Image (spheres, helix red, strand yellow):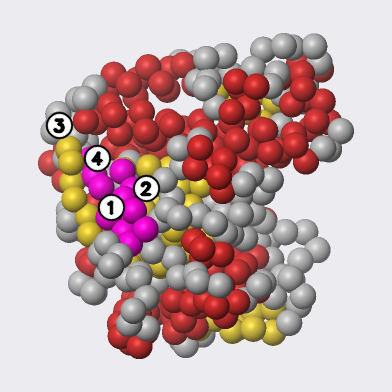
Amino acid sequence: MSEPFYFSISKRLPQSGNGLGKGGKRHGRSAIIHTPHGVIRTPAFIPVATQAAIKGVLPEKMEELGAQVLLSNAFHLHERPGEEVIDEMGGLGKFMNWPHPTYTDSGGFQVLSLGAGFKKVLAMDTAGLSKEDIVAQNSERRAFVDEDGVDFKSPLNGSKERFSAEISIGIQHKIGADVIFTFDELTTLVDPRSYQEESLERTFRWAKRCVAEHERLTEERKGKPYQALFGVLQGANYEDLRRKAARQISSLNVDGFGIGGAIEKKILGQICAWIADELPEDKPRHVLGIAAVDDIFAGVENGGDTFDCVLPARCARNGAIYTRLGRYNVTRAAFLKDSMPLEEGCRCYTCTHYSRAYVRHLLRCREMNGSTLATIHNEHFFVHLLDEIRASIEGEYFDEFKESTLRRFYGF
């Protein structure tokens, strides 16, 4: 019998009066998420296995470096190999030989960003830009939203497709992850307030349909491990909309929450705090698409339990290496004959076996092993950063750890 899904808080941050929540509250905590495929000790970083794989890294290596859970993309897995194939193969974890917990996102980001022809970065760097500024050059708008769902052209082959609340939940049920997300409408920081309000209400209506379909499929697919449904919260940079979204989604029968949408970097912590003020404390909160060191600390302190992002692996493939002393690019000429590991003192597989000179050589020759070795290190960096943050909460030295870590990493 598989373990049911539930959430238990281990330790809360002390209320020092300088938090961003109501009355100076700090919402940070350590906790345990219990899933049918094992526990997730939070705060935790979740590496993104978009196509049921971390590019160039076997699941066994992800387990070895300490990853507790992987997140895959429902849209891309729907495109290929198809959710029916994964269902027949026993579900996502068995399909990719990962015996631990798994998440899938709803596909909303891909449908409404890739399908709309947006550039990769939608949210944090759009100050002063127009909608046209964030659309990729020589692209066409390929996604059109209506009350029922979204019509779009597949970025893979240009075919006409449709996603809706029911379609997204149906796909995610067949993929079989332990945690799935409601289908929401992605907006950007350049959308006007009037559209943000309209979109928020539509996302709430879609969320209610997602819950209904989730309940129907859970009953229909009895005998399968229970899948927890997280409701996604939108509202851009507006406090009243973020709080409203939190109240709306928490009124539904969901198991947890996803903090998503367009978020301006400088107020990420504040947005998380607004949301956490309104949410029940006995359910987990996942912050979607965040992997800057300062953003992770802000998210944790203000209520985030888990975080995912493609950035560690994507940066690694381009030679960008994360260390406690900041980020550097190992492909620079300065590292041609450098016998040091990627990060001195790091105990990841790459750093205990290979030099900067060798990883640089592989990346510059475009050998796949270069991306593999760099990715192992970067994923290790973020997984263990969150492990250390969790330990600092439980050991009651979070503030000191935050200050020293940010000072080293950013040099201030």
User: In which image quadrant can residue 202 be found?
Assistant: bottom left
Q: Residues within 10 Å of mark 4 (few under 14, many from 20)?
A: many
* Residue assigned mark 4: 30
Sequence-wise, the earlier of marks 3 and 2 is: 3
Position of 201 relative to 97 (above/below) = below
Sequence-wise, the earlier of marks 1 and 2 is: 1
Residue 292 shows in the view: no
- Residue at coordinates 42% horizontally, 22% vertically from top-left? 406
Q: Observer-nearest residue: 272 or 373?
A: 373
Sequence-wise, the earlier of marks 4 and 3 is: 3
Q: Which mark is residue 306?
A: 2
Q: Which residues are magenta?
A: 28-41
* Residue assigned mark 3: 14
**Mark pair 2, 4: CA separation:** 10 Å
* Residue assigned mark 1: 33
User: As shown in the figure, which amino acid type bears the numbered disc 1?
Assistant: Ile
User: As shown in the figure, which amino acid type bears the numbered disc 3?
Assistant: Pro
Position of 209 relative to 281 (above/below) = below
Report the side of 290 relative to 28 (left or right): right
Q: Is residue 36 magenta?
A: yes
Q: Residues within 10 Å of mark 3 (few under 14, many from 20)?
A: some
Residue 338 x/y as whole percent = 74, 12
